[in-house]
């Protein structure tokens, strides 16, 4: 199940998982989620346990988290006419041997929400350089500039970028077309019919002011390992 973390309990669960996984990777354990109308945190859970979280934030007068390390690069995108940039931040995912469909679903839902509700045209993300290949291969992101030091986590960081049009084209070409040895996440994205259903549900629940459960993917997807699973309240 994938949902917007729109209650204190859900945000607390997402923050706990984030800090647990970040601490394990040496990125500190004191991270929190800023509350903003331009920022939406999603959580992924199976059988009432949270195993993943990812936040999408649209650019605004408040700026983006990326500004602290890559302000000049972000300002370049801002200066480009007709771009509506969004950042992906605070990504934490407790993996399992068969977690790829779950990870693909989380990114696909973020994409749907970003296009439908935030009018995103371009996505930016800051990653540790050792994870660059993952984002290039799995999702088609490209590097922007050279690595820098993120002073908040005292670790190297690489800015990466992809357009929403690139994501849309990859979904159109690859969704549902899984082949042996395929490394991209896009073959595990939702079918056009499933995406249409998610868009409809998001629109309906957002109109009622109570967007919560986005979708339930059923029992065929793998449940992450127990090491970091947290109860969803």
Image (cartoon, helix red, strand yellow):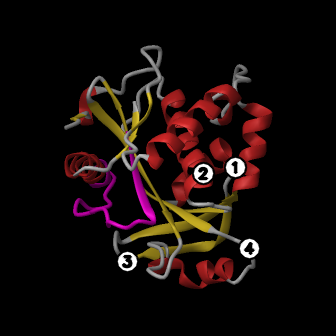
Residue count near mark 3 (Cα–Cα under 10 Å), binned few <14, some 14–19, many ≥20: few
Q: Is residue 120 above or below residue 233?
A: below
Which is nearer the N-term, disc 2 or disc 1?
Answer: 2
Q: Which mark is residue 140?
A: 1
| Residue matched to label 4 | 82
Q: Is residue 104 above or below residue 219?
A: below
At numbered mark 4, what does the secondary structure look like: helix, strand or loop? Answer: loop
Real-space CA distance between mark 1 and mark 3, rounded to the nearest whole angstrom: 27 Å
Real-space CA distance between mark 3 and mark 4, rounded to the nearest whole angstrom: 31 Å
Q: Is residue 62 above or below residue 110?
A: below
> Which quarter of the rendering shows the C terminus?
top left
Residue count near mark 4 (Cα–Cα under 10 Å), binned few <14, some 14–19, many ≥20: few
Labelled pair 1, 3 in contact (Cβ < 8 Å): no
Residue count near mark 1 (Cα–Cα under 10 Å), binned few <14, some 14–19, many ≥20: some
The region drawn magenta spans: 21-43
Where does residue 14 sit, x and y in percent of width and height? Answer: 29, 48
Q: Which mark is residue 66?
A: none
On the question of residue 98 being in view, the answer is: yes
| Residue matched to label 3 | 151
Tell which of 160 and 11 is nearer to you: 11
In terms of image quadrants, where is residue 47?
top left
Determine the residue positioned at 40% across, 30% down: 1
Relative to residue 80, is residue 90 drawn left or right? left
Real-space CA distance between mark 4 and mark 1, rounded to the nearest whole angstrom: 22 Å
| Residue matched to label 2 | 116
């Amino acid at each position: 199940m994938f949902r917007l973390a729109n209650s204190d309990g859900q945000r607390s669960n997402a923050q706990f998982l984030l800090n647990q996984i970040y601490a394990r990777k040496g990125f500190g354990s004191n991270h929190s989620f800023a509350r903003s109308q331009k920022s939406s945190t999603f959580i992924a859970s199976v059988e009432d346990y949270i195993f993943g979280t990812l936040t999408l934030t649209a650019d605004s007068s408040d700026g983006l988290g990326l500004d602290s390390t890559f302000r000049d690069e972000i300002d370049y995108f801002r200066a480009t006419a007709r771009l509506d940039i969004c950042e992906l931040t605070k990504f934490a995912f407790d993996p399992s041997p068969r977690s790829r469909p779950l990870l693909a679903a989380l990114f696909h839902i973020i994409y749907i929400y970003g296009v439908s509700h935030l009018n995103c045209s371009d996505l930016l993300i800051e990653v540790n350089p050792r994870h660059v290949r993952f984002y290039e291969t799995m999702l088609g992101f490209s590097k922007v500039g050279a690595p820098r030091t993120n002073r908040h986590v005292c670790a190297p960081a690489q800015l990466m970028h992809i357009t929403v049009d690139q994501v849309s084209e990859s979904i159109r070409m690859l969704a549902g077309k899984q082949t042996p040895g395929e490394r991209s996440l896009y073959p595990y994205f939702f079918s056009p019919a499933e995406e249409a259903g998610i868009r409809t549900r998001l629109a309906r629940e957002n109109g009622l002011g109570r967007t919560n459960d986005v979708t339930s993917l059923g029992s065929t997807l793998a449940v992450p390992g127990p090491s970091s699973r947290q109860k969803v309240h």
